[in-house]
């Protein structure tokens, strides 16, 4: 969106039209011609329809707040989900009581999702974004929060003295080089993040408290010794790793937080000694650990609480003889092992057909296959559903016929 269209969109009457856009017919073309007949320019019409679509998409991340916000497609893609933003806020606010005034700087605020949580939970927020339109959208999105202000500025130009906590969510996607579908590319070099990771870590180390949100594929070697690194999944999707410093750090080292219907915290202190992280025979259940636990390198920490063992030293599946229960079961998806089948397609097909199986979900770890290709090659006739897991038991390549538990 260009600044001129944004200015027109921010007109009270235009915003009111956006709030009531569902009065119009559902079909996009009909909506567009109705808005043009009402006198809106082609640019404002397009902006209204885009905002209506983005508000609907944003509900998954931001709940009912989305209906009162404005977005860019990139800004929404990079925005933190509200429950995760609330977790960031709890970390930065720490033990502060309602009477304390905690000043947080959000240094690259995007459309403002993290700032909404900081401010909503009582902090005084100064947010900046280097992109003019994005900063204006954040200002709009935070307009009801009295203790939040937004400026169009680079993080590097902000005077960081006097803040109780700093929040960084550096841009990790290329700017202005979108492909045909409007997606930008992921940047892998941390020095090319904006601001760069070394600048961010330098400021975070000097702050009273700080949090840095990064992509979950972060190389463990880049985690500073002084930080707590926490990989987070929300409703089964790995969403980030956060580095916490100073008062925001609860436990140095690597951890994983599983958020969803149930919550689970796993930490590297829970890892067994090298020789206790047993590899063993396949049991009655195969366990697929949550992605945050896998990314944090903490799969072995689930062995003791789930009475489980690993199937292979470098494969992130566990196996056990008892159905997982208790708090640690929130960290795995369990499959009952029905049988071990041959990995060759022709023999596998024969086995599946003889069991009346006609549609398969294919999972893999440690196996060089492409699930979609396998499904096509199997050419199964109509029949029951099953989950196939291509993996290795020790050095043996196998296919496990399984049934999801629960
Ligand atoms: C990942 S997004 C932030 C998302 C935000 N936490 C949220 O939940 O909505 C990163 C933002 O940083 C901004 N940015 C990039 N370089 C910056 C810099 N040097 N200073 C300030 N903001 C910057 C980008 O314009 C982008 O909006």
Image (cartoon, rainbow, N blue to C red):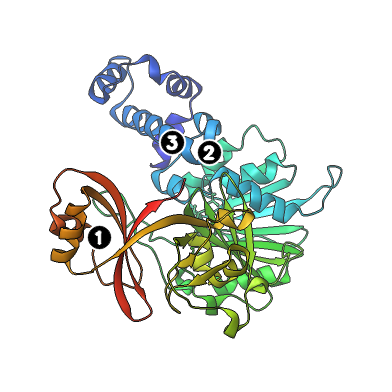
First of labels 3, 1 by sequence position:
3
The disc placed on residue 400 is: none
> Where residue 47 appears, x then y in whole percent?
36, 32
* Residue underneath mark 2: 62
Q: Quadrant of the N terminus?
A: top left
Label 3, on which residue? 6
Q: Residues within 10 Å of mark 3 (few under 14, many from 20)?
A: some
Q: Foreground: 319 or 247?
A: 319
Which residue is more in the foreground, 140 or 257?
Answer: 257
Q: Which residue is mark 1?
A: 371
Q: Is residue 225 above or below residue 34?
A: below
Q: Are marks 1 and 2 in contact (CB under 8 Å)?
A: no
Q: Is residue 313 shown above or below 375?
A: below
Q: Could you tell which of marks 1 and 2 lies nearer the N-terminus? A: 2
Q: Nearer the viewer, residue 211 or 49?
A: 211
Query: Residue sitting at 51 percent across and 22 percent down?
Result: 12
Does any portion of residue 114 appear in the rendered image?
no
Residue drawn where x is 53% and y is 49% of the image: 80
Where disc 2 sits, the SS reads helix
Asked if 394 appears above or below 335 in the picture, the reply is below
Q: Residue furthest bottom?
A: 275
Q: Position of residue 17 (x, y in %)?
A: 43, 19
Instruction: Measure how far apart labels 3 and 2 are at the Cα level.
Output: 21 Å
Image quarter of residue 281:
bottom left
Q: Position of residue 345 (x, y in %)?
A: 16, 65
Say whether marks 3 and 2 touch (CB < 8 Å): no
């Amino acid at each position: 969106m260009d600044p001129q269209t944004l200015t027109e969109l921010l007109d009270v009457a235009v915003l009111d039209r956006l709030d009531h856009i569902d009065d119009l017919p559902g079909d996009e073309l009909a909506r567009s011609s109705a808005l043009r007949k009402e006198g809106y320019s082609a640019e404002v019409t397009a902006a209204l329809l885009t905002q209506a679509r983005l508000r609907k998409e944003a509900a998954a991340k931001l709940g009912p707040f989305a209906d009162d916000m404005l977005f860019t497609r990139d800004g929404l893609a990079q925005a933190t989900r509200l429950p995760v933003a609330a977790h960031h806020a709890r970390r930065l606010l720490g033990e502060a009581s309602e009477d304390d005034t905690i000043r947080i700087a959000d240094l690259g605020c995007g459309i403002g999702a993290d700032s909404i949580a900081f401010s909503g939970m009582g902090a005084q927020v100064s947010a900046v974004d280097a992109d003019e339109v994005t900063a204006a959208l954040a200002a709009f999105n935070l307009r009801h929060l009295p203790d939040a202000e937004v400026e169009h500025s680079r993080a590097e130009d902000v005077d960081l003295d006097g803040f109780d906590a700093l929040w960084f969510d550096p841009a990790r996607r290329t700017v202005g080089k979108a492909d045909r579908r409007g997606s930008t590319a992921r940047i892998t070099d941390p020095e090319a993040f904006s601001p760069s990771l070394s600048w961010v870590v330098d400021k975070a180390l000097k702050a009273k408290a700080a949090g840095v949100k990064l992509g979950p594929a972060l190389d463990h070697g880049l985690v500073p010794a002084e930080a707590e690194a926490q990989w987070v999944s929300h409703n089964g999707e790995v969403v980030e790793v956060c580095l916490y410093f100073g008062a925001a750090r609860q436990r140095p080292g690597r951890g994983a937080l599983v958020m969803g219907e149930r919550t689970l915290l796993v930490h590297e202190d829970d890892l067994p000694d090298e020789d206790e992280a047993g590899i063993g025979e396949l049991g009655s259940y195969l366990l697929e650990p949550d992605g945050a636990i896998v990314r944090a390198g903490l799969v072995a920490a689930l062995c003791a609480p789930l009475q489980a063992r690993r199937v292979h030293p470098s494969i992130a599946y566990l196996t056990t003889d008892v159905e997982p229960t208790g708090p640690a079961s929130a960290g795995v998806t369990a499959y009952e092992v029905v049988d071990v089948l041959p990995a060759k397609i022709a023999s596998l097909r024969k086995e599946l057909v003889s069991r009346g199986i006609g549609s398969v979900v294919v999972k893999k770890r440690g196996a060089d296959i492409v699930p979609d290709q396998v499904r096509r090659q199997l050419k199964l006739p109509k029949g029951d559903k099953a989950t196939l897991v291509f993996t290795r038991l020790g050095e043996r390549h196998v296919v496990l016929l399984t049934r999801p538990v629960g």
